[in-house]
Amino acid sequence: MRRRTLSRRIFLAGLGKGGVAAAVGVGLIACGGDSEDPTATAEASAEASPTPIPTTTAAPGGGGAAPTATQPSGGAGGGASSGLVAVEWERANLGFVSAYVLARGNEAVIVDTGVAGSEGGIEGALGALGLGWDAVGHVIVTHLHGDHAGSLPAVLGAAPDATAYAGAADIEGISSPRELVAVGDGDLVFDLEIVETPGHTAGHVSVLDRVGGIFVAGDAINGADGGVIGPNSRFTPDMDLANQSVAKIAGLEFETILFGHGEPMLSGGSAAVGALVA
Ligand SMILES: [Zn+2]
């Protein structure tokens, strides 16, 4: 475990990365298809070492209480003033794509769901955090592609109280047993900030934890060889808009990047995206 002691923020960000050791073929960066190997499972979960659960004092019991996204009252600054702790995160390494669980105490958000049949891998990531489906109050789908939204029906079936969210322009293209809540710039879900990052799809959104300095990228940017690269032009219909989104991401502040495709970057995140833009 590569714990960092530079700051409490980075230390917390590193707690949940037990699955990082599993290799991912970044050459397989693929998105948009639904024909990829559905047998891909979260092998990384088996790799995950017991993850220390932070002893937060966040009161449990609020899971699923907020059916809609909320707007921040004070703009940038997120929930820092509310005494929030950084989320703990765990990767569900689903093969060529990843989903993530972000948790505080015994409440969790799932960001992306992999291809159909990925619910077992996501359950493994929850378990690595000491959580089960009952902890899941929110599911955010970054965009409509099948390798990110494919297991949404199964996930919502397993977490019957969870609310699901996606960018407005993508909602129509996402199969869901329950109505999705449209989210956009500045909306807060579980005190995580939604960032519109269109281009890869029209309604693509990313997720920022300002407290922990963690950015969940979806396919707005990708990981490669320990670094960051731009969106995959093969699967991105509006590259101009997608590149504008990359520049927008570079203007945010975060250390950790959790990619849909590629190994998580544990430090230097926004600086690396800035270098990419330059
Ligand atoms: Zn995609």
Image (cartoon, helix red, strand yellow):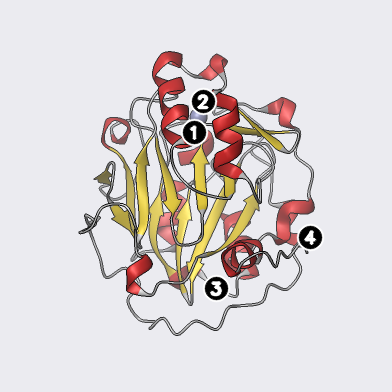
Residue 136 percent location from the top left of the image = 43, 66
Say what amino acid the circle numbered 3 marks.
Leu
Mark 2 is on which residue type? Gly
Nearer the observer, disc 1 or disc 3?
Answer: 3
Residue 15: x percent and y percent? 65, 67
Give the residue type at disc 4.
Glu
Instruction: Judge: label 2 CB < 8 Å from ligand 1.
Output: yes
Viewer-nearest residue: 273 or 145: 273
Q: Which residue is drawn at 36% across and 64% down?
A: 160
Between the C-alphas of marks 2 and 4, the distance is 28 Å
SS state under label 3: loop
Vertical side of 81 occupied by 119: above or below: above
Task: Count neighbours of disc 2 (C-alpha within 10 A) and say few if under 14, some if 14 to 19, many if 20 or more.
Answer: some
Disc 1 residue type (three-letter) = Gly
Instruction: Of the two numbered discs 2 and 4 on the same chain, state the one appearing first in sequence.
Output: 2
> Which numbered tag is attached to residue 146?
1
Q: In this view, does 236 lie above or below 123?
A: above
The Cα atoms of the two marked residues, 4 and 1, are separated by 26 Å
Which is more N-terminal, label 4 or label 3?
A: 4
Residue at image mark 4: 47
Give SS at disc 4: helix
Q: Return the mark for residue 131.
A: 3
Report whether 93 appears left or right of 106.
right
Q: Residue at x 47, y 28 (%)?
A: 246
Q: Residue at x 33, y 66 (%)?
A: 161
Whether ligand 1 has any atom under 8 Å from the Cβ at mark 4 is answered as no
Numbered badge on residue 32: 2
